[in-house]
Every structure is written in structure tokens, then in C-alpha cells.
């Protein structure tokens, strides 16, 4: 069981120099979902390089059914840690106040996200 942060599209102007990676991860994500693996994709909501809106547009191309609309998730300090939307086979999580390198900006929230993924638990949808 792995939490993988995949590159949905290039986040570097130097992408033309990469020859060992596909131009889109969408086919791989479709395959992982088809195999029944849990897929979480996360993003900092202040990421100026790959904005949440761009990721949402990209994920829309998968044509997945929405299971649960946007819901806030909470940190153990009873603050909103970000938002989640659950699709059939995929969960997209945002981390409030994080930029492009999420763990550098929000290490506590990043650890909480990873722990919940590994424990196969949803992030808390209310203060606890």
C-alpha cells in the first residue's frame, strides 16, 4: 500500500528534457483505479505552479462519478486542514496554506494525510 504523489502534468519548463516519463499520468491513474487500488491525489491550495483548479480540470477528464462533494477536513488542532472530494476510486485532498512542496509548507498536515491514508481512514470532517 503506497501513497504516491504523481505528476498529472509537467510542473517544470524543462519537461522537454524528460524522456523517461509519460506526458500524462491519467492512463496510469485509470489503471490503478481499475485494479481496485486506493488512489489519493493531494495538492497545496496555494500552489502557484500547479493550482488546484488545474488539477480538478485534469481529474475531470477521468470521468469518475462523484461519491462525496467537497468537504472540509480538520487537523488535530480543530482547524480546517483543507478540503476533500471523493470520486469513485479516487480521493482528491487539498492542504490549506501549502504551496508546491506540501510537506515543506505543512509538515503536520502532511503527516496526518499520510497516516489516514495508511490506516485506510477518511480525514476528519469535523473538529475532534
Image (tube, rainbow, N blue to C red):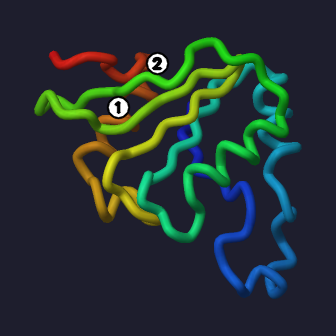
Q: Quadrant of the C terminus?
A: top left
Q: Is residue 112 above or below residue 90?
A: below
View extreme (left): residue: 77
Q: Is residue 122 above or below residue 9?
A: above
Proximity of marks 1 and 2: CB atoms separated by less than 8 Å: no
Give the residue at mark 1: 115
Q: Position of residue 45 (x, y in %)?
A: 44, 52
Depth order, front residue of 28/96: 96
Q: Is residue 122 left or right of residue 127?
A: right
Q: Is residue 81 left or right of residue 118?
A: left
Question: Which residue is drawn at the image coordinates 71% and 84% (left, top)?
Answer: 13
Asked which quadrant contains residue 23, the reply is bottom right
Question: Which residue is drawn at the image coordinates 34% and 47% (left, top)?
Answer: 96
Cα separation between marks 1 and 2: 8 Å
Depth order, front residue of 75/29: 75
Q: Residues within 10 Å of mark 2 (few under 14, many from 20)?
A: few
Asked which quadrant contains residue 59, the reply is top right
Q: Which mark is residue 120?
A: 2
Q: Secondary structure at mark 2?
A: loop
Question: Which residue is drawn at the image coordinates 50% and 69% (left, top)?
Answer: 48
Q: Quadrant of the N terminus?
A: top right
Depth order, front residue of 58/16: 58
Q: Is residue 44 above or below residue 11?
A: above
Q: Position of residue 46 (x, y in %)?
A: 42, 59
Question: Which residue is drawn at the image coordinates 59% and 46% (left, top)?
Answer: 4
Q: Which mark is residue 25?
A: none
Q: Secondary structure at mark 1?
A: helix
Amino acid at each position: 500500500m503506497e501513497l504516491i504523489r504523481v505528476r498529472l502534468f509537467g510542473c517544470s519548463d524543462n519537461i522537454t528534457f524528460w524522456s523517461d516519463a509519460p506526458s500524462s499520468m491519467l492512463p496510469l491513474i485509470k489503471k490503478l483505479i481499475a485494479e481496485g487500488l486506493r488512489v489519493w491525489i493531494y495538492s497545496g491550495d496555494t500552489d502557484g505552479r500547479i493550482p488546484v483548479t488545474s488539477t480538478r480540470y485534469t481529474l475531470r477528464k477521468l470521468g469518475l462519478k462523484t461519491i462525496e462533494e467537497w468537504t472540509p477536513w480538520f487537523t488535530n488542532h480543530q482547524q480546517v486542514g483543507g478540503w476533500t472530494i471523493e470520486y469513485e476510486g479516487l480521493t482528491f485532498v487539498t492542504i490549506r496554506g501549502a504551496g508546491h512542496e506540501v510537506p515543506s509548507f505543512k509538515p503536520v498536515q502532511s503527516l496526518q494525510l499520510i497516516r489516514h491514508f495508511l490506516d485506510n481512514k477518511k480525514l476528519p470532517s469535523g473538529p475532534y
